[in-house]
Amino acid sequence: MLIPRLLGVSLALVCLAGAVADDRPGHSAHGSAFDSGLRQRPWKMEGIGRSHFAITAKNPEVQEWFDQGNTLLHSFWFEEAERSFRWCLKLEPENAMAYWGLAACSLNWFSEPALDSPEAKRGLEFLKGAVRRKASVSARERMYIEAWDTAFTGENMDRSRVLAAELQKILLAHPDDVEAKALYALYGINGGYAYQTELVIRQVLDKEPEHPGAHHYRIHNWDYVSTEQALESCRKYGGIAPNIGHSNHMPGHNYSKLGMWHEAAISMDSATRVEVKYMSERLALPFETWNFAHNRNYLSYIHEQLGMERASLAGSRALIAAPRDQLRNKEDDLGAYGQGLQALTRCLIKFERWDEVLKPGVIPWRDLPTDKAAKAFADSLAHIGLGNLIEARATLNELRALAKAQSEKDKAWGVDLGFAADAAEGLLRAAEGDTLEATRLLLQAASAEQKKRENGSYRNDPPPYPWPVYRVLGDVYLARGENRLAIDAYGRALKVEANDAFSLSGLARAHGALGEKEQAARFAGRLAYVWSGADAGLKWRKLVDDAGNKAEPVAETPAPERPYRLDLLAKLGPLDWEPFAAPGLECRDADGKTVRLEDYRGKNVLLVFYLNEGCVHCVEQLVAINKRASEWAEANTVVLAVSSTPPEKNKESQKLGGLAMRLLSDSNHDNARRFTSYDDFEEIELHSTILIDAKGRVHWKRTGGDPFTDMDFLIKEVKRMNEPARSVSGL
């Protein structure tokens, strides 16, 4: 087979000839900041709530799109907010506030002080565009632009504090500006001043009772402070913006802290289904939706707390199986794979599935320091649980070595291996019969954990560890018959994990052993309530029942709850992401014959949208793909390369290069639009690389100004795509 060297040379000359006009085909004419993000036109969105931010605009439609973008910003849906603000620029290219909106999508409440990330740098570029055009807007609007400029380009690294001070200036000049009050509440959030922020939020809600930002920010304001103060907004927020994942998700944070596990599950379940539906409808993948992996991990954690072991494991496996991003998920524990591993490990430990923990392949560990530490921790507990004390000591030594080498930065992030090692060794000492040392180590670990919780450095969002250390200390005391000490330890555990069923089980048994029937019945009733929809046969429930402490369900929650069941929200759509049906493809090949995806049913398709025969980078991509022709064939994969090039030119190129792929013509860009490979803002073609399985479903894609050339990654993903789905029952 000929390598298309001549094709590459001839097309390179064409590219060079046109370099003066456009030397970056597929890239935005407005600068690199516009090269990423969603590049297809927005649509009028329903179920997102309402807000109005008056701006200077000649075209009334600009105000409508700006309001939609601003409303989405209030629910932290940055990707879609950016799409709406971009359309404002499509209609009015010099609109300063549209640039401000784009800047606010990237320079937001989550921005790190140093602003070194690519996303922050994009935001700074957008902000420059707003500053350059600020003379064209009202004095009030200029104050917003200048507020962001002062906060994000100044030397003071406390960005939120500076921004709150600047927003206060806007409020003093424009006391009726509801949007300024809402943003002031957000950027003024500080645990020590939560009541002060609450008063501002009330002013917003007095004017606009269903303002999505006010309810959202109230939830964040009281989170970790006095969580029950936000219950009213928790009840309302999801209903105000039902079609936004985050508006359903955030109440679940507060419900979890209050031990309202049924309501928490309803929140996170709704959020997950809403996001899955959005991804399916908009051809988005899990790694393109910032909140999805976090939300799904949280739902798995809540399923654990409800005794829904199988549902929790199913969710963790779905996260691990989700598409991976070659750029974002290398060592990122916040990505779907890392969060899936966390959820899977946490659940297997919590429900003491020791054989599965140790069975190779059940937990698909990576060769990363974080995974090595998590594996050493999990293996130590599993060996202890199975009575393999010599093996437990060996894996514990590995954990100790990793803890010793852990950086202070990693400890500050919330996963402190030191107290994890102390907890594991405490359990090992207990198994060895060394009562005093076991107690000392577990108390030391519990104290270290408590200090981290108090100073805010314990990652509890959801927790990476399977239990508060006080809970396993209670288990150790209970096993030794020290029931009073067990009751104290379980009570301390409940203060940080309210209505935790495992602690409730221990309390029912400890009080029962002391003959305190009324107290035993109370905790047994609370357990029965939390686990009213739990899997059958869980030992913690059975131990309570067998001890004669069986009781009717009793709720002890700050507010009434709706009972959660797995099928409760099925009408919203599926719970876990699955590959979505590919859009229709209808192109013409080099002979003018119509080609459709259905023609390749039973085979995988590597679908490549390239710009045209005049793009040297496109040629490089096609050459790279062509070099691996035998591997594609071995993986039951055909390659289809689509551009706007007419069939007759494709025929000429096909002959010249000897390409082992079909070059297809999409003359009007209709197919490119269906596959989101067209920039509607600038009306230019984009590069897209898409993996479609033998059933015609999209598993992975990348779209942007540059072609995707990591063939090793693509081949690995095709092989993963070919693997049969692993059932949770096989764990």
Image: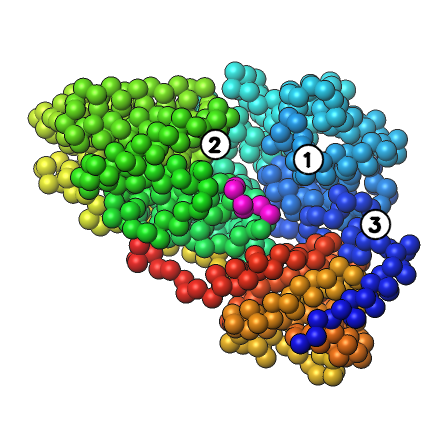
Helix, strand or loop for the magenta stretch, by majority? loop
Q: Earlier in the sequence, mark 1 or mark 2?
A: 1
Q: Number of callouts in the render? A: 3
Quadrant in the picture for residue 55: top right
Q: Nearer the viewer, mark 1 or mark 2?
A: 1
Report the residue at 77% width, 76% height from top.
Answer: 656
The residue that disc 1 covers is 120
Residue span colored magenta: 327-332
Q: Is residue 602 left or right of residue 652?
A: left
Which structural element holds mark 2?
helix
Q: In the picture shown, does residue 177 fall above or below 621?
A: above
Q: Which mark is residue 29?
A: 3
The residue that disc 2 covers is 232
Q: CA distance from mark 2 to mark 3?
A: 47 Å
404 or 411, nearer to the observer: 404
360 or 152, nearer to the observer: 360
Q: In the picture shown, does residue 318 fall above or below 671?
A: above
Residue 180, x across and y down, in percent: 69, 27
Residue 437, x across and y down, in percent: 21, 21
Q: Does residue 471 appear anywhere in the picture?
A: no
Q: CA distance from mark 1 to mark 2?
A: 34 Å
Q: Amino acid at mark 3?
A: Ala
Q: CA distance from mark 1 to mark 3?
A: 20 Å
351 or 381, nearer to the observer: 381
Q: Residues within 10 Å of mark 1 (few under 14, many from 20)?
A: many
Q: Are marks 2 and 3 in contact (CB under 8 Å)?
A: no
Q: Is residue 28 left or right of residue 199?
A: right
Q: Amino acid at mark 2?
A: Glu
Q: Earlier in the sequence, mark 2 or mark 3?
A: 3
